[in-house]
Amino acid sequence: MSKKPKRVYLDSMIFIFGRLEECNSRLVLFLAQLGEFEAVTSELVIEEVEGFFRENFSRETAYLARKFVEELSSYIVRRSDIKAEMDALKGKIKAKDLENVAAVRHKNLKYLVAYDKDYEEADVKEYITPKEFVKLFELRPYDKEY
């Protein structure tokens, strides 16, 4: 078994699926809430989570979702801090994923927990699915990857 990580980057889909379904993303959030690891996110993740819940639910739900992400995250990577990493990655990864990968590399994190085939196709070495991530903590995952 791999050594349990201390800090990991959580993609927006972890917060979205983890709040809506019984799935591995929910287990990831539960582990973070228990303090098993520190969650790192970015301004992009906060914006995406808030936007999803505003569009699909309500302004109030969006506000609560944003607060949840901010409170669970031990560190929020600012866009202004990752400009150099983003410039270096341009053209190597899809624009929608650029900021996440740049944030992971800026903070020198081993894992980017997400469910996004684009990371796999771009050969992002830090990418790990929620299902594989919960296995690092010797938990029995749900059958679904996310």
Image (cartoon, rainbow, N blue to C red):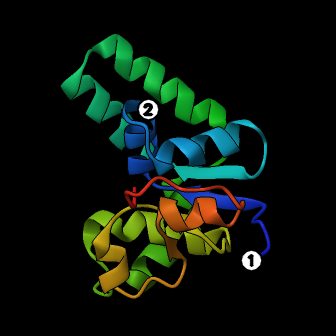
Q: Quadrant of residue 23?
A: top left
Task: Confirm whether residue 90 shows in the render.
Answer: no
Choose mark 1 or mark 2, whichever is in front. 1
The one of 88 and 76 positioned closer to us in this rendering = 76
Residue 32's label in the rendered image is none
User: Is 136 on the left-hand or right-hand side of 9?
Assistant: right
Q: Which residue is mark 1?
A: 2
Give how far across and how far down residue 63 sits, in percent: 42, 19
Residue 19's label in the rendered image is 2
User: Is 55 on the left-hand or right-hand side of 126?
Assistant: left
126 w.r.t. 56: above or below = below
Q: Amino acid at mark 1?
A: Ser
4 w.r.t. 62: above or below = below
Neighbours of disc 2 within 10 Å: few (<14), some (14-19), many (20+): some
120 w.r.t. 44: above or below = below
- Residue at 40 percent of width and 55 percent of height: 146
